[in-house]
Image (cartoon, grey):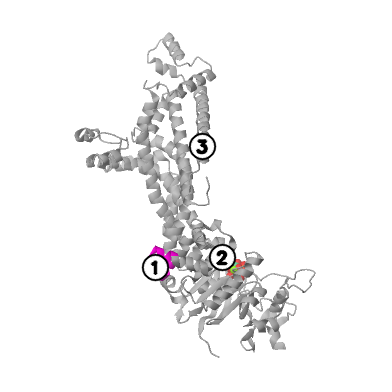
Amino acid sequence: MPINREYIVKRAISLIFVVLGVIVITFIITRVIPARPELLWAGPHATIEQIERARRELHLDKPIHIQLWYYFTDLFTGNWGISWRTRMPILPSILGALPATLELVVFAFILAIAIGIPLGISAAIRRGSSVDNIIRIFSVSGASTPVFWLALLLQLVLCNWLGLLPAAKRVDEYIVLSTGFRPITGFYIIDSLIQGNMLVFIDVVKRIFLPAIVLSLYPMCLSIRMTRALTLEVLSELHVRSSIAWGIPRNRVLYRYVLKNVLAPVIASLGLSFGYTVVGAFMVEIIFVWPGIGYYTAMSLLSYDYPAIIGCIIFVAILYSIINTIVDLIHAIIDPRVKL
Amino acid sequence: MVRDIILSINDLHIDYYTPDGVIRAVRGVSIELCKGESLCIVGESGSGKSTIGLATIRALPQNAVITRGAILYNDIDILKLSEEEMSKRVRGKEISIVFQDPAAMFNPLFTVGEILLDVIATHLGIRDRRKAYEYGINMLKLVELPDPERVVNSYPHELSGGMLQRVAIAVALSANPKLLIADEPTTMLDVTIQAQILDLLKRLRNELSLSMIFITHNLGVAAEVCNRIMVLYAGTLFEEGYTEDILTNPIHPYTRRLLECIPRAGRRVSRLKFIPGTLPDLRTPIPGCPFAPRCEYTTDICRKTPPPIYEVGYKHKVSCHLYQKR
Ligand SMILES: Nc1ncnc2c1ncn2[C@@H]1O[C@H](COP(=O)(O)OP(=O)(O)OP(=O)(O)O)[C@@H](O)[C@H]1O
Ligand SMILES: [Mg+2]
């Protein structure tokens, strides 16, 4: 599959428009909600004059299109602004938080695929059996379980009552200090492996496990249902029958041929569920005190930190576009009929 | 003249279980096929032709149940073999099949060569990729495909229906089966290609001394390819015999109507003929002859009792009450 340059250009252009649209919409929403972020900026016990000055400093006294103009001109010079909450530059803060989220989301998606696809296939080939029914009940109830509820429940049971897993944070600071672990890429699993630091590695895996399970539940259930439905559909197609009739063993037909037919659409649907997963990540990161973008965004939202909110949303939009581009590419690699 | 019987199907009954009831698709069909013979199963859509073909290679859909009967291939009891033994010993190696829809026979995500080489590697145990590839190319040459090196690396959507049908024949024959079931292999092709595929099948049958079951709803095609014809209706046998006998001396009213339906050059007809009416509902019991509602000679007995099978000539059987009354 030769990657078409036109396709990449088209995707890049559409990304620019998506980001512009997202900025404008978020800008309008933040400006019309009845909130007074200048109070936060001015600090507690501020006088009326101080609050007025804060309003001017934040340009909140200007009309919205002027504010938007200021924002755009800054953005194109690489200045994403200062967080009104932490008073730190936003871009480095987001970039610093990104690996934590990516590690969590990637881990969750790997879990979702590694568990969801085999379960979906076993349900399909045992259609109507009790195994099939159990898997189907699990996938329906799992997809409708609220993320925050499950997160709190698992935390309560596994961490507080049984004490099996740590309840929060990416890594234990004490272990980090005592073993001299240094983040390099920001992906702690990779970093600890590079440095051969098994103590940190084990701690990191123990801590990522629970939030990743919670986060993976929705995409996992989605992939179970998609895989089951698609497998049943593909199994009824003539090429399965003819391959078997020509003497290729049934299991090989299933795992070598049918699996590939199922994979592309399942991965595509997971890509589409990415938006939902990011929303889930906001909750999961708050509950598990996970220092990622979700945590940062949630904190910014709670304190009307407009520039940080917009910065985060731009990032999520970019991430969403990139993931869907990757999904498209995977689809094109798997299916020779797809031309990008 | 006694010849070896390669396939014998005895009193086969097949039901399909559907949400709307049980479809009794095959109702007691018996077939005897000798080595090197080609038998044509003719009948209109829904008469159970494909079901018989699929049962022979045990590739029926999940909801099909063989309720009665036996299928013997040489000395192998097909219905008693395990799934693994079927794949290992029978499918592709002894009995093989090609279907109606050439494009749907191939997985769209794989090149046709991948399937071909997989079948070759599975059956002939050729592990060396180079050798399997050469063997595959030779198979494609055997079915008269131009430019086999290109075809082998093509995806199904890159090949025409006629080419795909040739590839399917190549795959089906690659492990030297003795019996080929061809389930309407030309129905979806245009007329010139149809003739080419028929010629190819005839040539291969002679060169490889294949036995063949050829399924079609077109008696004209049947007459061209096969030395025996079996007319099937609603899952039951209506008439069976050597092609010349059926063509020159058709006994069953349904066979005669089928013969009238063959459009022929030189015979001027104002419009194409067809048989009015449709097949009976296969979910309900059929007390008498299934053709009774459409037959112009129907009498009371036709509606009440199923007709027995009469031997009307050398290996010529018919199942019709009319014959008795003659
Ligand atoms: N998978 C299935 N489930 C339920 N019923 C089926 C199934 N396959 C076939 N049937 C029914 O069985 C009967 C015989 O079907 P079959 O495919 O053998 O007919 P056919 O003679 O091959 O027809 P055609 O010329 O259309 O291929 C039909 O009434 C059909 O509706
Ligand atoms: Mg058919």
Query: Quick one: B242 or A22, which is closer to the camera?
Result: B242
Q: Residue furthest bottom?
A: B1
Relative to A288, does residue B228 appear above or below in the rendering? below
Q: Position of residue B43 (x, y in %)?
A: 64, 73
Cα distance in 3D space between marks 2 and 1: 24 Å
Q: Would residue B126 be counted in the magenta stretch?
A: yes
* Left or right of residue B260, residue B142 in this image: left
Q: What's the magenta bit mostly, secondary-structure-wise?
A: helix
Q: Which labelled disc corresponds to residue A9? A: 3
Cα distance in 3D space between marks 3 and 2: 40 Å
Chain letter, disc 1 residue:
B
Image quarter (top left, top right, bottom left or bottom right) of the N terminus of chain B: bottom right
Report if residue A307 is visible in the image: yes
User: Which residue sits at x=35%, y=35%?
Assistant: A99
**Mark 2 neighbour density, 10 Å: few (under 14) some (14–19) many (20 or more):** many
The amino acid on which the numbered mark 3 sits, given as a three-letter code, is Val
Q: Position of residue B319 (x, y in %)?
A: 65, 82
Cα distance in 3D space between marks 3 and 1: 46 Å
Q: Residue furthest left?
A: A178
Q: Share a chain, discs 3 and 1?
A: no
Q: Which stretch appears magenta?
A: B120-133
Chain letter, disc 2 residue:
B
**Mark 1 neighbour density, 10 Å: few (under 14) some (14–19) many (20 or more):** some
Q: Which residue is mark 2?
A: B165
Indicate the secondary structure of the residue bearing disc 1: loop
